[in-house]
Image (cartoon, rainbow, N blue to C red):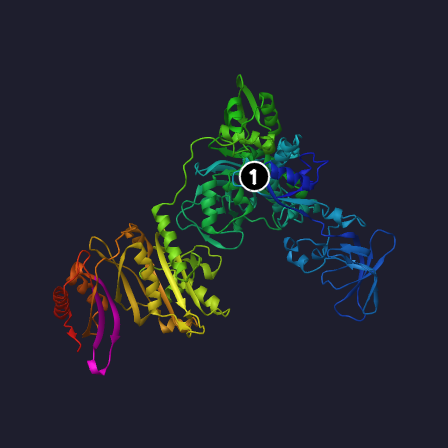
Amino acid sequence: MKVSYQWLSDYVDVQGFTAEDLADKMTRSGIEVDIVESLNKGVSGVVVGYVKSKTKHPDADKLNVCTVDVGTGEDLQIVCGAKNVDAGQKVPVAVIGAVLPGDFKIKRAKLRGVESQGMICSAKELGMNDKLLPKEIQEGILVLPENTEIGKPIVDVLGLSDNVLELELTPNRSDCLSMIGTAYEIGAILGRPVKLPEEGRNINVDFSTVKAEDKISVSIAAPDQCAHYAARLIEGVRVGTSPLWLQNRLMAAGIRPINNIVDVTNYVMLEYGQPLHAFDADQVAGGKIEVRLAAEGEKLVTLDDVERTLEPHMLLITDAFKPIAIAGVMGGANSEVTEGTTSILLESARFAGPSVRKTSRQLGLRSEASLRFEKEVNPEAVIPALDRAAALLVLCAGGQVAQGIVQETVQAYSGVKIPLKLERVNTYLGTELSLQQVKEIFDRLGLEYGLLEEDSLIVHVPGRRGDITRDVDLIEEVARLYGYDNIPTTLMTGVTTPGSLTREQSLRRTIRRLLTGSGLHEVITYTLGQRENAADYPGLYPEYAPIPLAMPMSEDRSALRTSLVPHLLEVVSYNRNRNNDDVAIFETGTVFLSKETALTAQPQEKRLLSIAMTGNWSGAHWGQKARKADFYDLKGVLERVISYLGVTIEFRSAQKEGFHPGRTAELFLLTPDGERRSIGYMGQLHPTLQKKRDLEDTYVLEAELDPLLQHADFEVDYRILPRYPSVGRDMALVVDTAVPVGDLERLAAETASELLESIRVFDVYTGERLGEGKKSVALALVYRHPERTLQDEEVTETHARVVAALESAFGAELRK
């Protein structure tokens, strides 16, 4: 919320305090002021001038020579290149000696041989936010209203001597989304009374002879979404440009002026925090207003000229035949105020915040009005804001207000009453405040109260303070106004419980520590990505398509991811584009799975572990050459993790889309109860995908994380160092190339039973001598008994059983 210092002074006396003083006091009392902005960016010596004549420059087609009256009695000759300058205009003129933003000083000059005695200025040259002005003004000089006084300083005309406080409001302080609400806050801080606009309490206009109820009617068919709807009829209005004072205040608040009708509704919304809407009354068929829910598939073209398809939960404002507005969000183009509008139906209502929030988010229509409705407007401001706007419309657009307000109330606001004990206040705050001190604070806040019993009050909370619902909220108000700095400091007492990590948190940290210890860097990528990435790399869940966002901010972040690998590849590409070719990274993150194209339920979430490697795994030095990362480096990193976690993973050769057809393995988790479960894949990216992303050989792994965490065994078994010698036996087996080496190792271990201490592969050979489709696998087996020395005979016997088992199961032959 942007708060104009000068506008604020209309409601509360701020004399003696600068804008910076108010910002400091508000921040100390709980409402942070992010910045105090001066609207004068360094303008001095600029006045209002009148262009008496315009002639073409004799030596430049795009320049004009203007004669300008600046109220000094002597006309100035000014050369101007703006396309929209013309005789009869009132314009800002920087005379000789004036200064513009950027310390730009105006001097006497000659342009193509013609003397120029000043400069006619645009809004941008005055340091104004020209984006809030109409496009034709953005591209040329600033044209002022005809009734602007010649010679008057431009900083006074455009309100540039003002300062704007930008409030960083928390969601509960929606009362300060209005000038009056902010005035109450400032009044409470300074201890000064608040002055409300007279028109908000007693509208003082000349009413017409027409009764509003004879021409319009109001009914509410959705009482849960609309508690109160009120309307006034103003006839004979003239749509045009708003007075400059009104435009200045809107622009100070960051709102672009449009016309006097719309500007008044925006002005009152900023003033009271109550959004209003103006309909062209002649376009409201039958003069009938009905507040109802939309029908399935009903359509409405909104003011932004977009056709919206509505859903049954969306609240509409309709006339006798058609919808004319989406309640609390945006009006319809079919009832828009135009230059030809002469009658206004002015709406002020109390719509349910959740209904407006859901509709605005679903349609992607967020506005200043919907923001206030979402946070629940002041129910007591519906009629005062309506009356205030009607009076301002008469002032700014002429016309007459019809007699009476047409309204329907289905749920009257009864107010909130909260009992509060003084003892509870002092117990919470650690203070010794008296009842009189608490009463004085409530007086400053504008809260009415009565004496409930001795040292106890019953407090009546006004509708503007919807954040106060319990006694602790009142205690917070006492603390804020008493001053946090005045509350004594005390040590905390009571029983405390030391914090600790859950088993799952500890395991996740362990995995990250093991991976970083293995030489990988952890990355955290966006949860959102491109839908096209799934076509290149479908990941572990090819049956699930990425879930599209309803309103993505960019194409690159338009869908919830179903795999982490595409994001890791983006990181790899980013590094390679910056000459960092050796990349080894990992991420533990969440993917989102749903088979629905339009979500009706929360998607399933899966946590994954993903790794990507490319470039050199070990760098070059005097003792060795650099070595490229390969499949077995990736496998070794994973084996280190699973070894520490105490889980068993089986690697099986696999064919997987997105992977190299001959360098891919599927990962199977072997559980203690004998279950064999696929949890992921690892291997080299498919060459086509590598080429598409301009990558060298890149190895990736993606596995489900939760099964690893579920079956991890942190129990550490300690064994004494072996006291008896081991016996080693080697064997070279010729088997079919399709036989997994892991199967050979497992069968050998099962056959040798407890005598086998370890088994490892130390050679794999293929060649013509073995025959087509054959390979030689050399295994080194170590036998040992923990309690005695093994006899050569029993080792020989056990080793023979192992060989026989392998020959029987896999057709293996001992290689001579």
Which one is nearer the viewer's eye here, 475 or 810? 810
Q: Would you say residue 548 sits in the magenta stretch?
A: no
The x and y percentages for residue 556 are 46, 62
The structure residue drawn at horizontal position 48% and vertical position 54%, both measured from the top left corner, is 307
The x and y percentages for residue 442 are 59, 27
The structure residue drawn at horizontal position 80% and vertical position 55%, both measured from the top left corner, is 98
Q: What residue is pinned by disc 1? A: 274
Q: Is residue 623 left or right of residue 265?
A: left
- Going by the numbered disc 1, the residue's amino acid type is Gln
Q: Residues within 10 Å of mark 1 (few under 14, many from 20)?
A: many
Task: Tell me if residue 85 comes above or below residue 282 in the rendering.
Answer: below
Residue 354 appears in the picture as rendered: yes
Query: Which quarter of the picture shows residue 236?
Result: top right
Q: Is residue 76 left or right of residue 321?
A: right
The structure residue drawn at horizontal position 20% and vertical position 52%, both measured from the top left corner, is 673
- In the rendered picture of this protein, how many numbered marks are placed on residues? 1
Task: Tell me if residue 167 comes above or below residue 700 in the rendering.
Answer: above
Give the dominant element type of the magenta stretch: helix, strand or loop.
strand
Extent of the magenta region:
757-782
Which one is nearer the viewer's eye here, 45 or 115? 45
The x and y percentages for residue 745 are 21, 65
Q: Would you say residue 762 sits in the magenta stretch?
A: yes
